[in-house]
Image (cartoon, helix red, strand yellow):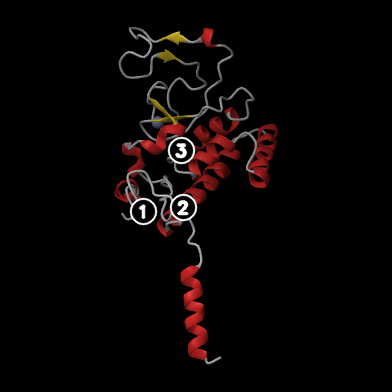
Amino acid sequence: MGCRRWRTRLAELERCLPKPLLLEDPQREKRRLLVGQRLVRLCEQACELMTQEEQIDVAEGFKQWAEAVGGPYRWWFRDLFQGRCRLPELAPATMKELLVTWLSPDCDPMTQVCRGCGLLYPHPRLSSLRDLKLLPGKVPLVGPPPWYDFPVYFPSCPGCGASPNDIDWSHLVDRLDRPWMALDGYVGFAIRTGAIPGIGGLDGRKPLQRRRTKWLET
Ligand SMILES: [Zn+2]
């Protein structure tokens, strides 16, 4: 077979191959790398402030994440790299508090993201719905949420000091457009292309993604 025909067949074959459903945006890949580097740096700085016992427990948590995407940091790190929250620059003492608090077996897997800075930080799970108290002046399901005063580990957001009631549930962040999404430390979400269109059409979320990720271009 001549070289030219061989190349033509290969090109045809390539055109017929099924396209990946989820094409990773190279810019998102870069942001993921930068956020990963920030995460490692903040963890290193925080570990220097820990007791030896805390260091051992936190290191075990990192190991469980690295080996099986499990362990006490799985909700935080998963949502960070899926673009559902942001990792702002945090003081080493703040990062230490977060890492140590996440070790509690009572952390709620229904995670919350601060509307002010995009940080996802832990809160205790409710032992019973009876523990839930209404916020002053609020009526359930009337007016904008939140309606209830959830128990907290942090009386205010460790990243920006916003109220712990000023949050979004992390599983709903994909549908939202918050100012923190244009700041550094945010991976952005995956753009769906190919057979499964994104919300709002094939490229419906690209303009939003561009607005959200200005930080990398400045
Ligand atoms: Zn915040």
Instruction: Give how far apart the Cα atoms at labels 2 and 1 are.
Output: 9 Å
Q: Secondary structure at mark 1?
A: helix
- Determine the residue positioned at 66% across, 37% down: 55
- Determine the residue positioned at 47% across, 37% down: 91
Q: Nearer the viewer, residue 48 or 215?
A: 215
The three-letter code of the residue at mark 3 reads Leu
Sequence-first disc among 2 and 1: 2
> Which residue in the protein does label 3 denote?
90
Q: Nearer the viewer, residue 52 or 60?
A: 60
Question: Which is in the foreground here, disc 3 or disc 2?
Answer: 2
Q: Is residue 133 visible?
A: yes
> Which residue in the protein does label 2 denote?
34
Sequence-first disc among 3 and 2: 2
How many numbered marks, from 0 up? 3
The three-letter code of the residue at mark 2 reads Leu
Q: Residues within 10 Å of mark 3 (few under 14, many from 20)?
A: some
Sequence-first disc among 3 and 1: 3
Q: Secondary structure at mark 3?
A: loop
Give the label on residue 216, or none: 1
Q: Residues within 10 Å of mark 1 (few under 14, many from 20)?
A: some
Asked if disc 2 is less than 8 Å from ligand 1, the answer is no
Q: Position of residue 39 (x, y in %)?
A: 52, 45
Q: Position of residue 63 (x, y in %)?
A: 67, 43
Instruction: Give how far apart the Cα atoms at labels 3 and 2 are.
Output: 15 Å
Asked if disc 1 is less than 8 Å from ligand 1, the answer is no
